[in-house]
């Protein structure tokens, strides 16, 4: 009996905490906190192969004015199976979400991702240009 009362109190406490936290705190459709931050940019970029090891040659070049990320990969890299990793300004999010490996083989049409600010008001679409290192 005592055990049931303790479990009931724990559950009640958890429900009250959840209810208190969910009131008045703005979240987006992904359950992420909406803040007042307007910063909206890519701060770093990584490109991984199927073994989850970097295939980059040198650092990616991020141009926050031209909204481009340019990266060179090792000769022989399979451009159809790369895993991009973005680091963004605080509280930003990326659209579309990266859910797995991405095909970068169409080098004439760079892949695009939109960075969305913490306040969800500023949106900037970056083109990711991948080139292959020469032999």
Image (cartoon, grey):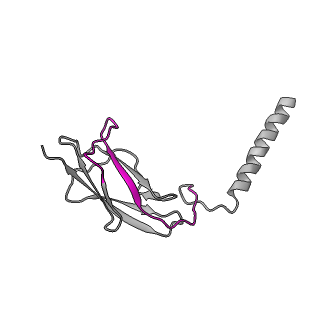
Q: Residue at x 50, y 70 (%)?
A: 121
Residue 77, given in percent of the width and then of the height, sits at 22, 41
Relative to 55, say whether 126 is above or below.
below
Q: Residue at x 46, y 63 (%)?
A: 116
Residue 68, given in percent of the width and then of the height, sits at 30, 62
Residue 118, given in percent of the width and then of the height, sits at 52, 62
Secondary structure mostly taken by the magenta-highlighted segment of the chain: loop
Total count of labels? 0
In reply to whether residue 45 is colored magenta, the answer given is yes
- Name the image quarter holding the N terminus: top right
In reply to whether residue 55 is colored magenta, the answer given is yes
Q: Give the residue furthest to the left.
A: 135
Q: Which residues are magenta?
A: 32-60
Specify whether residue 1 is in view. Answer: no
| In this picture, residue 35 sits left or right of residue 88 | right
Q: Residue at x 36, y 51 (%)?
A: 45
Residue 60, given in percent of the width and then of the height, sits at 30, 52
Q: Residue at x 57, y 55 (%)?
A: 31
Q: Nearer the viewer, residue 50 or 3?
A: 50
């Amino acid at each position: 009996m005592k055990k049931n009362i303790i479990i009931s109190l724990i559950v009640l406490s958890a429900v009250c905490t959840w209810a208190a936290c969910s009131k008045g705190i703005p979240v987006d459709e992904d359950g992420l906190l909406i803040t007042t931050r307007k910063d909206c940019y890519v701060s770093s970029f990584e490109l991984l192969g199927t073994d989850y090891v970097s295939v980059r040659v040198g650092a990616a070049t991020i141009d926050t004015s031209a909204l481009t990320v340019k990266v060179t990969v090792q000769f022989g890299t399979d451009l159809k199976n790369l895993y991009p990793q973005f680091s963004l300004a605080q509280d930003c999010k990326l659209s579309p979400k990266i859910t797995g490996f991405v095909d970068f083989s169409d080098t004439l049409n760079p892949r695009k991702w939109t960075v969305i600010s913490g306040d969800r008001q500023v949106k900037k679409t970056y083109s990711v240009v991948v080139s292959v290192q020469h032999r």
